[in-house]
Every structure is written in structure tokens, then in C-alpha cells.
Image (cartoon, rainbow, N blue to C red):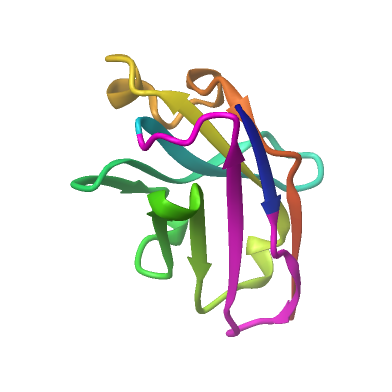
Amino acid sequence: VQLQAYGGGLVQAGGSLRVSCLASGRTDSSLAMAWFRSAPGKERDFVAAILSPSRIHYGESVKGRFTISRDNGKNSAYLQMDSLKFEDTAVYYCAGSPRRSDIYAYYRRPSAYDYWGQGTQVTVSS
């Protein structure tokens, strides 16, 4: 499975941006998908995960502002980011994992995911 993240860019605080993740090599919908982010000098942090249509999770700092979704027909996952803040500036990575039983308990951990995209830079100007 190969993941390609794209759609990052420069946006003003308070604005919106959508980043996308295109999956290839495995076109079924059985992958759990997630977004993580990494700011300079900081660890890779959990942003959001969509484990199934009814199991969606968000990191505390983005709840109410970000929305994760997927389109299985397009083999894609998305992260809609609204009300962006300066502290949202980071490289955003998409990640995927087969729906093993442990993903439901450990979805916040980068180590739970087998596949990673290359990252896309999101910069929020204050």
C-alpha cells in the first residue's frame, strides 16, 4: 500500500484548508485511516482517525474544528481543517492500517499504523 498526502499550503489564522490522502496498491475499504502531525522539535501527534463509519476519533486540540472523512470509491481520506490556529502549523501525515483488533485500542499511536504518506506542510500565519 502506498499513501500520498497532498493539499497543504499557507493559510491565515481563522481560515480553512483540506488535505487529502490517496491510497494505491490496496483499493478495498478495510484500512483504518488516520492523520498525524509533526511540528518542528515535537513528536508526531495524533490528529484524527476513521476506523469505521461509526468509529471516528479526534485529538483534543482539534475537536470541533477538524473533520476526517473518506471516499472509498476514490481510495482517499480527507482532513477538513477549519478555524485554523497558528499552533496547527505542522507537517501532516496520513497513515493506514489493516483493521486488526489492536487498532481500536491503539489508534492514537503512530506505531499502530503500517503505511505512511510522505507528509504535506500546513502553515498557518498569525
Q: Residue at x 70, y 64 (%)?
A: 7
Residue 50, magenta (yes or no) = no
Q: Is residue 13 magenta?
A: yes
**Residue 4 locus on image (x, y percent):** 69, 44
Residue 51 on image: x %, y %: 32, 37
Quarter placement of the N terminus: top right
Quadrant hosting residue 71: bottom left
Residue furthest toward the left? 54
Vertical position of residue 2 compared to residue 6: above or below? above
Span highlighted in magenta in the image: 6-29
Residue at 60% x, 37% y: name it.
Answer: 24
Viewer-side residue, 61 vs 22: 22
Residue drawn at (59%, 58%) of the image = 20
Q: Does residue 102 appear to the left or right of 45 in the view shown?
A: left
On screen, residue 37 above or below 74: above
Q: Position of residue 73 (x, y in %)?
A: 41, 53
Closest to the observer: 29 or 39? 29
Nearer to the camera, 126 or 26: 26
Residue 12, percent from left and from top = 71, 84
Asked if residue 56 lies left or right of residue 11, the reply is: left
User: Relative to residue 44, is residue 51 drawn left or right?
Assistant: left
Which quarter of the rendered picture does the C terminus lie within? bottom right
Query: How many callouts does the rendering have?
Result: 0
Left or right, residue 35 beside residue 104: right
103 over 89 or under it: above or below: above
